[in-house]
Image (cartoon, grey):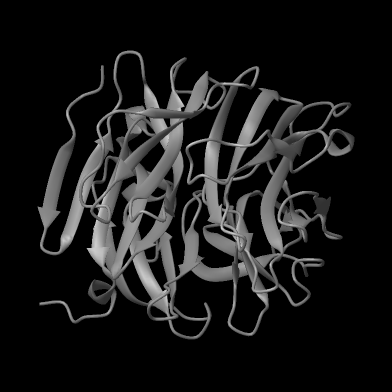
């Protein structure tokens, strides 16, 4: 049984500790939002039952909000049962141009077979199609597609950024990673790998860990890729051909630990929203920790970030794997928010008005 839901209101910011762990449910993490046509919001997340580790048994569960993310249903709806040998986890949701909802997640079978798959729903999430492999048997390996990462371009192309860490025949996993993207030009019916697969390197030529990539489309149509690293900053790359090719990853000015960032465009303002563990000015005691959790906006397509706000700042907190949703004039953030000892056990959903991102601090 889960612990009671806890709600904390700080001015216009409302935090709902929606998914605390329970005795038979030690971890709740890596979800995504989609707005339904009846006005509700659906949040689908990774509900673990076999332990807190990334390879423990888990299924995909859903919760609903009928008031724009202010309050949420208290009982899980099973979206996808555990069809993997190990688990299913790490959710992305998209509304396709034809009205269907696309659901992406990792089907994890072994250290040599962890690949994203896609299902679609024509009835607002009441039922789902059979799964389609984003990465086929010919490219089988251990890939990581983070939650809330699959995007659709203005052209209609779907882009799934992934990091490869192992393949059959390798001597063992390469956790430093190789980054690439899988592309679909037929709404997910078929997929192919882009032309670029790349590792990360520092200015001195030494290997840099690159993991958990994300992509956002800039106003001019170019794609910005951002990648977590162990170099103290997010690395980035920019594609001018719809994700077909990418120049070498390079350090950005987004300072962070080895932790994923998230970037999406705010529909009502056109600005980009960044959510990350901002380490631009943290004390040495917090170096390497996934705290604090901050937000900022960019008015120049991701070249500069302004108006930083702190969402969470507990020194013992562990804030990561953020999903970003928009409901009217409000932003919804869902993220892991446990203490370090149970870092990925709890999911909090935080809601605030878009205007809070740019209004002057009292």
Residue 282 in sight in this render: no
> Residue 234 placed where, x, y %?
55, 61
- In the picture, which quadrant includes the N terminus? top left
> Residue 164 placed where, x, y %?
74, 42
Question: Where 333 sits versus 175, above or below?
Answer: below
Q: Quadrant of residue 224?
A: bottom right
Question: Where 75 sits versus 152, above or below?
Answer: above
Q: 153 and 196: which one is in front?
A: 153
- Residue at left offset 41%, top offset 61%: 275
Q: Quadrant of residue 141?
A: top right
Q: Is 4 left or right of 277, judged from the image as shown?
A: left
> Residue 244 placed where, x, y %?
81, 66
Question: Where 7 sits versus 127, above or below?
Answer: below
> Residue 76 placed where, x, y %?
35, 28
- Residue at left offset 24%, top offset 63%: 352
Residue 260 in sight in this render: yes
- In the picture, which quadrant includes the C terminus? bottom left
Q: 170 and 93: which one is in front?
A: 93
- Residue at left offset 34%, top offset 34%: 340
């Amino acid at each position: 049984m889960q612990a009671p839901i806890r709600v904390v209101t700080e001015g216009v910011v409302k935090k709902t500790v929606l998914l605390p762990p329970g005795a038979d449910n030690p971890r709740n993490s890596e979800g995504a939002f989609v707005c339904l046509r009846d006005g509700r919001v659906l949040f689908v997340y990774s509900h673990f039952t076999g332990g807190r580790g990334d390879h423990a048994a888990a299924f995909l569960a859903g919760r609903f909000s009928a008031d724009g993310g202010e309050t949420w249903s208290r009982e899980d709806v099973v979206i996808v049962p555990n069809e993997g040998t190990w688990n299913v986890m790490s959710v992305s949701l998209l509304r396709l141009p034809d009205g269907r909802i696309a659901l992406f997640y990792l089907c994890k079978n072994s250290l040599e077979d962890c690949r994203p798959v896609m299902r679609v729903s024509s009835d607002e999430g009441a039922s789902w199609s059979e799964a389609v492999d984003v990465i086929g048997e010919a490219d089988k390996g251990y890939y990581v597609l983070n939650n809330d990462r699959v995007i659709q371009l203005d052209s209609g192309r779907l882009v799934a950024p992934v990091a490869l860490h192992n393949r059959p025949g390798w001597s063992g996993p390469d956790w430093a990673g190789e980054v690439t993207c899988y592309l679909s030009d037929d709404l997910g019916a078929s997929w192919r790998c882009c032309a670029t697969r790349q590792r990360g390197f520092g200015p001195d030529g030494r290997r840099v860990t690159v993991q958990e990539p994300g992509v956002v489309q800039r106003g001019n149509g170019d794609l910005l890729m951002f990648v977590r690293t162990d170099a103290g900053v997010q690395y980035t790359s920019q594609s001018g051909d719809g994700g077909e090719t990418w120049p070498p990853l390079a350090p950005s000015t987004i300072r962070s630990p080895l932790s994923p960032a998230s970037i999406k465009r705010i529909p009502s303002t056109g600005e980009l929203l960044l959510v990350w563990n901002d380490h631009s000015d943290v004390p040495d005691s917090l170096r390497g920790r996934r705290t604090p959790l901050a937000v900022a906006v960019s008015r120049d397509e991701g070249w500069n970030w302004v108006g930083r706000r702190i969402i969470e700042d507990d020194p013992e907190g562990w804030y990561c794997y953020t999903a970003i949703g928009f409901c009217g004039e409000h932003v919804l953030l869902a993220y892991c928010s446990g203490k370090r000892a149970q870092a990925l056990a709890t999911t909090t959903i935080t809601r605030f008005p878009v205007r809070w991102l740019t209004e002057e601090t009292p």
